[in-house]
């Protein structure tokens, strides 16, 4: 868990050193029952896999006197140190240790978020399971013979299953008007940060290193006038390339809190939530339909009721829009980071024969050069239940082949769509037949009568029908 990810609220028991530190199996946790079974131990998230390696002796965690297990944890989970972002708002259960002089550090890769508090009681972790979404862990900060990631459920989910996480176990970034101690100024507002957030509302209570030109943000500064927090001096906190003198940076792995890492984090957190929401709602809809018709096995997508199909297609459509950055706030000036995060992130690929990757940055007018989320390659995306996966791929194909040129996707140019389509055809495994039949020369799908019959339910879905009712001249 992490403050960055508003991590939260785990409850600490009075205990001897190295004893149980995380609350489990106490109290009500949403989604505990069928069909989600959130409390199941059948997990394959990165930390669950790492714990199995630790238990078997295939991996070990090394401890140092300054950051404890942190450096070793990051190395074993393949999380780059350059991903460090620093937050000084008190949005964590370890709030007493967090101030502008001792910010909390957050590190992340595509599947895991790690939170570190100097002199804290635990390393916090959120690890995404392909089926169950966000799984919360604590690792005791004290040195132990056999360090263990303990799963934390009850109190973490109190903050991490909320409207801001789309009401599923997820992650969120908060931006506040911070006081000199890191608390939120009374009667001030706060913001949940995503790719649709204006920069001027981002990163309150965070440190940010890097330049954004004339685009101001809330990072690096505190409120001077508690009666008028809206007068926060955004200009003073923008375009800082170092944080010298603000805190003892020797207690952290790096002195940076890179603005590019912040941008990626804002996209990724809500993308994770949308994938989980689509997964959960699809499983619930299939389960409800099975119960309704009293079937022994889950029903096919074709037999779903209109209500249950809608429950699947609404989050799936939102996922497609977010995946293609339809709601992204445009950038107006060049963004430059300080930590080397951009270079390391980009190097991860994969790339097509022309060297293009969904991880390539733009940072002039938008975050990415090719606006389709790299999380399309994630295990979580691949684990979407079949009806949702089929819908998402079909809708994505419609948009990228310009069968759908509706206003919501207006920011995607012809070149954008063609580039993304070609990159995915070259690099994404598991694409449906519809994609592989695509004729690059004519720019249209090759006909296939069998597939046309299989696509009947998709064409007749409520959302697809609404999208097809566009004014003449919009869709060729």
Image (spheres, helix red, strand yellow):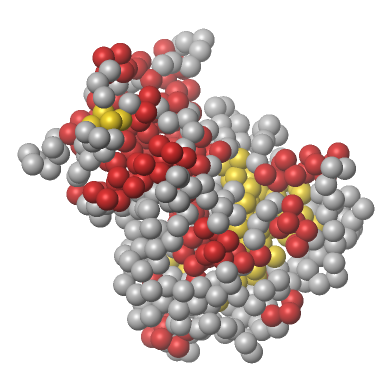
Q: In the image, is residue 297 above or below residue 246?
A: above
- Please say if 135 is above or below 198: above
- The outermost residue toward the left is 472
Identify the residue at image location x=41%, y=16%: 300
Looking at the image, which residue sits at the far right? Answer: 145
| Image quarter hosting the C terminus | top left
Where does the N terminus fall, quadrant-wise?
A: bottom right
Residue 410 location in percent, x, y?
Answer: 22, 52
Q: Is residue 295 left or right of residue 306?
A: right
Q: Residue at x 60, y 75 (%)?
A: 256
Residue 373 seen by the camera: no
**Is 76 drawn above or below residue 426 in the view shown?**
below
Q: Is residue 84 left or right of residue 208?
A: right
For this rendering, which residue is in front, 158 or 3? 3
Name the residue rendered at 50%, 83% in the picture.
Answer: 240
Q: Position of residue 254 (x, y in %)?
A: 67, 74
């Amino acid at each position: 868990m992490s403050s960055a990810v508003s991590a939260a609220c785990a409850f600490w028991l009075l205990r001897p050193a190295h004893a149980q530190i995380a609350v489990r199996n106490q109290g009500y946790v949403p989604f505990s029952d069928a069909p989600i079974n959130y409390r199941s131990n059948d997990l394959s998230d990165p930390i669950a896999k790492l714990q199995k390696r630790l238990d078997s002796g295939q991996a070990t965690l090394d401890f140092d006197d300054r950051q404890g297990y942190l450096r070793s944890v990051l190395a074993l989970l393949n999380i780059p140190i350059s991903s460090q972002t620093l937050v000084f708002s008190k949005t964590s259960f370890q709030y007493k240790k967090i101030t502008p002089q001792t910010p909390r550090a957050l590190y992340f890769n595509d599947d895991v978020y790690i939170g570190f508090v100097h002199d804290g009681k635990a390393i916090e972790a959120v690890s995404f399971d392909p089926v169950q979404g966000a799984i919360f862990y604590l690792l005791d900060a004290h040195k132990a013979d056999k360090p263990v990631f303990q799963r934390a459920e009850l109190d973490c989910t109190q903050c991490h299953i909320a409207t801001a996480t789309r009401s599923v176990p997820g992650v969120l970034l908060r931006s506040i008007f911070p006081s000199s101690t890191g608390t939120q100024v009374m009667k001030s507002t706060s913001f949940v940060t995503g790719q649709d957030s204006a920069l001027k509302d981002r990163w309150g209570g965070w440190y940010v290193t890097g330049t954004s030109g004339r685009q101001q943000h809330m990072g690096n500064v505190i409120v001077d006038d508690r009666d008028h927090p809206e007068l926060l001096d955004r200009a003073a906190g923008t375009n800082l390339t170092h944080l010298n003198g603000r805190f003892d940076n020797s207690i952290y792995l790096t002195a940076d809190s890179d603005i590019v890492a912040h941008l990626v984090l804002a996209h990724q957190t809500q993308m994770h939530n949308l994938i989980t929401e689509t997964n959960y709602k699809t499983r619930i809809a299939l389960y409800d339909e099975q119960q309704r018709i009293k079937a022994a096995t889950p029903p096919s997508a074709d037999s779903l009721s209109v209500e249950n199909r809608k429950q699947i297609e609404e989050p799936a459509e939102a996922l497609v829009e977010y995946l293609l950055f339809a709601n992204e706030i445009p950038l107006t000036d060049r963004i430059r980071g300080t930590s080397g995060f951009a270079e390391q992130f980009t190097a991860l690929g994969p790339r097509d024969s022309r060297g293009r990757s969904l991880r390539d940055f733009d940072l002039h007018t938008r975050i990415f050069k090719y606006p389709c989320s790299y999380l399309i390659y994630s295990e979580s995306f691949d684990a979407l239940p079949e009806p949702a996966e089929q819908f998402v791929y079909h809708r994505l194909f419609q948009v990228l082949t310009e069968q759908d040129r509706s206003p919501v996707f207006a920011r995607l140019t012809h070149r954008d769509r063609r580039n993304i389509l070609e990159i995915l055809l070259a690099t994404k495994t598991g694409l449906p037949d519809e994609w592989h039949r695509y004729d690059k020369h004519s720019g249209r799908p090759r006909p296939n009568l069998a597939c046309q019959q299989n696509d009947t339910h998709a064409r007749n879905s409520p959302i697809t029908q609404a999208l097809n009712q566009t004014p003449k001249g919009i869709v060729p």
